[in-house]
């Protein structure tokens, strides 16, 4: 005689389902819930089979989401257990009495994968859907999906593709976590802060907000030269595209929002002398202080090295 595996029934998913009047009829439960000989070793396999059955069988779905004008059925209890945001929506007193919940998500396939993850704690993540699933995880407060997306991204991120990913992630503040991963892998070395046409000519620059976003990210002292060169290049292209001479006045005006975030004391002496000074990015007093602070810092570092 088949019995119900009590260890399986103790899980939050199944506990929640048992507490729901819609699922008390045992003959309606997936067959994977029953075992001839309950085994601790088979626990994960059996649980996955149960949840996969709930996901794939419409018999266990009692609510409908409307995504991209398409009806997507789901199991209310499982959705509530996995997402506090969707739980609040489903329990709202203003919820549509028809049981249909309209969502403003636009990518139907991403949402279906998201639902699959809610049921099974797993789904196929690719380079095409990783950002979409990450955003769904953030929107509906599913930390496990956020982590899975980030793990996938880190695994597939390389020095070769980091600049490409950096540009695409930089333009969406909602996925800034991915940009930071690209940045730390050296993405700045292979990217510019402007866009080019098919002939390789600059046709637009990143917005000031995007450049500021980069400058606000923590960076090492030796990265300052590279980031400064990118900003100076951005400023020159900005002037070119706007028909402005590349003189000190226009360059400084283009860079005015960035100057407070530039760590001038980490620039090389030659950069301070041949770029910062001619373009008057700092006042004479500020530049003198920068030289002094830089010299003192180097002296302290040399002294510390000598005592080791």
Image: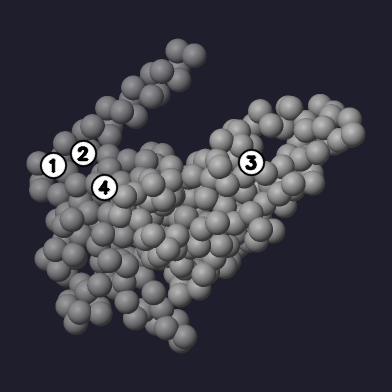
Q: Residue at x 48, y 50 (%)?
A: 137
**16 relative position to 9: left or right:** left
**131 relative position to 11: left or right:** left
User: Between tags 1 and 4, which lies in front?
Assistant: 4
The reply to whether dot 2 and dot 1 touch (C-beta < 8 Å) is: yes
At mark 2, the secondary structure is helix
User: Between tags 3 and 4, which lies in front?
Assistant: 3
Q: Kindly report the distance in space between the C-alpha atoms of the residues bearing marks 1 and 3.
A: 75 Å
Q: Kindly report the distance in space between the C-alpha atoms of the residues bearing marks 4 and 2.
A: 12 Å
Residue 69 is drawn in which quadrant? bottom left
The reply to whether dot 2 and dot 3 touch (C-beta < 8 Å) is: no
Q: Quadrant of the N terminus?
A: top right
Q: Which mark is residue 262?
A: 4
Q: Which mark is residue 24?
A: 3
Q: Position of residue 293 (x, y in %)?
A: 23, 32
Instruction: Describe the colour scheme in one phrase.
Output: one colour
Q: Is residue 91 above or below residue 130?
A: above
Q: Earlier in the sequence, mark 2 or mark 3?
A: 3
Q: Residue at x 10, y 48 (%)?
A: 283
Q: Kindly report the distance in space between the C-alpha atoms of the residues bearing marks 3 and 4.
A: 64 Å
**51 relative position to 199: left or right:** right
Q: Nearer the viewer, residue 51 or 300?
A: 51
Q: Nearer the viewer, residue 184 or 280?
A: 184
Q: Residues within 10 Å of mark 2 (few under 14, many from 20)?
A: many
At mark 4, the secondary structure is loop
At mark 1, the secondary structure is helix
Q: Residues within 10 Å of mark 4 (few under 14, many from 20)?
A: some
Q: Earlier in the sequence, mark 4 or mark 2?
A: 4
């Amino acid at each position: 005689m088949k019995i119900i595996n009590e260890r399986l029934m103790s899980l939050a998913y199944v506990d929640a389902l048992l507490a729901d009047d819609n699922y008390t009829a045992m003959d309606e439960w997936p067959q994977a819930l029953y075992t001839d000989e309950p085994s601790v070793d088979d626990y994960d396999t059996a649980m996955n089979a149960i949840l996969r059955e709930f996901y794939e069988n419409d018999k266990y779905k009692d609510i409908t989401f409307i995504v991209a004008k398409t009806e997507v059925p789901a199991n209310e209890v499982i959705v509530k257990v996995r997402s506090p945001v969707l739980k609040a929506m489903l329990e709202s007193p203003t919820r549509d009495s028809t049981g249909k919940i309209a969502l403003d998500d636009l990518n139907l396939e991403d949402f279906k994968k998201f639902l699959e993850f809610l049921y099974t704690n797993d789904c196929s993540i690719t380079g095409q859907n990783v950002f979409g699933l990450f955003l769904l995880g953030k929107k509906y407060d599913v930390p496990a999906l956020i982590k899975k997306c980030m793990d996938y991204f880190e695994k597939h991120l390389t020095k070769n593709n980091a600049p490409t990913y950096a540009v695409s992630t930089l333009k969406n503040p909602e996925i800034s976590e991915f940009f930071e991963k690209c940045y730390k892998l050296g993405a700045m070395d292979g990217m510019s802060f402007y866009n080019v046409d098919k002939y390789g000519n600059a046709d637009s620059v990143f917005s000031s907000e995007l450049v500021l976003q980069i400058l606000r990210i923590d960076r090492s002292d030796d990265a300052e030269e590279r980031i400064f060169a990118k900003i100076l290049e951005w400023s020159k292209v900005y002037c070119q595209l706007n028909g402005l001479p590349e003189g000190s006045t226009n360059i400084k005006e283009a860079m005015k929002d960035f100057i407070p975030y530039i760590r001038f004391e980490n620039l090389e002496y030659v950069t301070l002398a041949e770029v910062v000074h001619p373009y008057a990015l700092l006042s004479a007093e500020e530049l003198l202080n920068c030289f002094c602070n830089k010299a003192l810092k180097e002296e302290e570092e040399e002294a510390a090295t000598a005592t080791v």
